[in-house]
Image: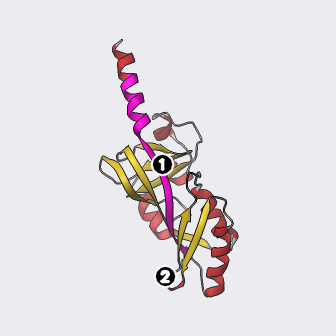
Amino acid sequence: MKKLLILLIAGFMTLGATAQFSKATLQATGLTCAMCSNAINKALEEVPFVASVRSDIKNSAFNIVFKENTPVSIDAIRKAVEDAGFSVGGLKVTGQFNHVAIGNDKHVEIGDAVFHFLDIKSNMLDGEQTLTVVDKNFVTAKQFKKISGATKMSCLQTGKAASCCVKEGVKEDARIYHVTI
C-alpha cells in the first residue's frame, strides 16, 4: 500500500511538470559573407517547426521562433545548418517550464526528447528558462573538449543513452541531449 501511495504521488508530480520550447539562439561557424547567412536563414525557415528566423549577420547568430504547440527537434536545427554547408557553434533553446525538477546528471524528458543536465545545482524550472546545448556538433571543438574532459560519462561522447542514463529509466540507445543552464 505504501509503495502504491508513493507511485501515485510521483505520478501526480510528473503530471504537473511541463515544458514547451518557444525560441532558440543559434551561433553559426564558417560564415564569411551575407550570402552565407542567407543560406542558413533559408535552410532554417524550411524546418517544419520553425515559425520565423531573424539573422544577426554581425554576430553570425540567428534568432529562431518556433511554432506554438509543435514538437521541436534540436537535431533537425543542426542538420539544416550543416546541409547549408556550415556548423553550429552554439545553441540555446528557450521555453516555458512548469515545475520541472532538474539536478546535476539528472535526466529529464521534455516533449519527445531526453535532456541530461550537466554542471548545475538541483532546482525547479518555472517560467521562461534558457538551456544551452553542449553536445558534440553544438559547440566548438575546443569547448566540447573542455566539457568532455570534466566528465567520464560515455553518453556525452555519443549522444546516446549509456549506463548512466539507462539506470534512470531511459531506453538504451535513446538520443540524449546534454544541456546546462
User: Residue at the spot x=59%, y=82% of the render?
Assistant: 31
Q: Amino acid at mark 2?
A: Asn
What is the x, y in percent for residue 107? 44, 43
Total tally of numbered discs in the picture: 2
Residue lying farthest to the top in this orientation: 1
**Can residue 152 be seen in the rendering of this structure?**
no
User: Residue at the spot x=46%, y=40% of the render?
Assistant: 164
Residue at the disc numbered 2: 59
Residue at the disc numbered 1: 115
Asked whether, in this view, residue 160 is left or right of residue 115, the answer is right
The image shows residue 159, relative to residue 166, as above or below, that is: below
What is the x, y in percent for residue 28? 55, 74
What is the x, y in percent for residue 159? 55, 51
Query: In the rendered structure, which disc, 2 or 1, sits on the residue that comes first in sequence?
Result: 2
The label number, if any, that marks residue 54 in the structure image: none
Q: Amino acid at mark 1?
A: Phe
The image shows residue 53, relative to residue 93, as above or below, that is: below
Asked whether, in this view, residue 10 is left or right of residue 139, the answer is left
Residue lying farthest to the bottom in this orientation: 33
Secondary structure under badge 1? strand
Q: Residues within 10 Å of mark 2 (few under 14, many from 20)?
A: few
Query: Is 102 in the magenta?
Result: no
Asked whether, in this view, residue 22 is left or right of residue 46, the answer is left
User: Residue at the spot x=50%, y=55% of the render?
Assistant: 21
Secondary structure under badge 2? helix
**Can residue 174 be seen in the rendering of this structure?**
yes
User: Residue at the spot x=40%, y=38% of the render?
Assistant: 16
The image shows residue 155, relative to residue 1, as above or below, that is: below
Alpha carbons under labels 2 and 1: distance apart: 27 Å
The answer to which image quadrant residue 136 occupies is bottom right
Query: Is 21 in the magenta?
Result: yes
Residue stretch in magenta: 7-28
